Amino acid sequence: MPRIHTYYDNLKVPRTATPEAIRAAYRRLSQKHHPDRNPDNPAAARVMVLLNVAYQVLSDPAKRAEHDCWIRQQEDLYEPFQSSFPPRPEPAAPDYRSRTSRPPPRRKEPPDITGRLREVVRGAFVFLGVMVIGVPLLASITALWEVPAWPTAQQTAHRHATKPTSEAFTKPLVQIQSRDPSGTYRLVKSDYKLDDGESIVHSKGKLVIRKLRKDTYILLEAKTFRAAGTQGDADIYHVQPGKFGFDKVELRNNKQKWALLDGDQLVKRITGANFEETTWWQRVPEGYSEKYLDRGIHEAERVYKLRLARGGADE
């Protein structure tokens, strides 16, 4: 049965924990992950939200009873599937002390000469078919293949006469322009881990990338956390020189925040003091909409405009 994530797991207490044990666990974890004690960790506020929600439910006897009832319902959903498969009977161990339990000696069968002869004849027919049909077909295809003609002496002389100067080699032959990452993306997968082994799961997410100026984009992101609501964020990213190939675009905010666009797939990574977050996104049409995610995008855009008015939005 797959493991069910509960509020007891958030506070790291068993389901039979007393109210005093729950209160002590909440106090210990809140002191460890409080944002005031972790100013360099932007994930501390998210962890505190999960701890507060879990403590509010488990500290209330009525809400805790409802949560325990929900856990039992989830466990009952998988119990019929486990009980539908009867246990396999274990084979009885043979009694080697009696002579009757020994297996009879295996009788040597004569070799199947007829079967081997059939395989040889079949292989001979296949070889003849390849030689009669495959070889002429390959030869005809090779004859139709156009071979480039060697340049004549006049063409060679004209090429040397019109040889470009040294200034031409200093200019790029092709003006390579990076692909525009602007558009709307939806969250496909998330991996958010803390140094102490805890992980946070995002159920849904939306990412909007807009171009501000040349090689500068704003990333508006909204993600929904389980039992914690939707949060929005806005950051400025800059396009970096291509080092992953002509078909990929690298976006970077600083040493801890970067993204890589490969076709319609975008991988975004954020590394903090004691956490690491990696998200995978898929480009979707512009009409993609989710009620709570759209609110998160609008909230992130509002916060960005406030930062811009104070002169600290562009990083």
Image (cartoon, helix red, strand yellow):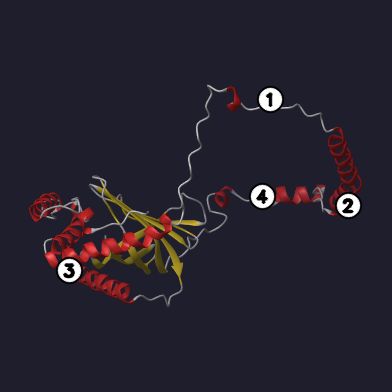
Task: Measure the C-alpha gap from mark 2 to mark 1.
Answer: 60 Å
Q: Is residue 74 above or below residue 40?
A: below
The crowding category of the residue bearing disc 3, from other C-alpha atoms within 10 Å (few below 14, some 14 to 19, many at least 20), is: few
Pointer 2: what residue? 140
Which is more N-terminal, label 4 or label 3? 4
Which is more N-terminal, label 3 or label 2? 2
Task: Measure the C-alpha gap from mark 4 to mark 1.
Answer: 87 Å
Task: Measure the C-alpha gap from mark 2 to mark 4.
Answer: 40 Å
Q: Which mark is residue 163?
A: 4
Task: Measure the C-alpha gap from mark 3 to mark 4.
Answer: 57 Å
Which is more N-terminal, label 1 or label 4? 1
Element carrying mark 4: loop
In the foreground, 165 or 139 = 139
The crowding category of the residue bearing disc 1, from other C-alpha atoms within 10 Å (few below 14, some 14 to 19, many at least 20), is: few
Element carrying mark 2: helix
Pointer 1: what residue? 105
Residue mark closest to the camera, 3 vs 4:
3
Residue mark closest to the camera, 2 vs 3:
2
Pointer 3: what residue? 310
Element carrying mark 1: loop
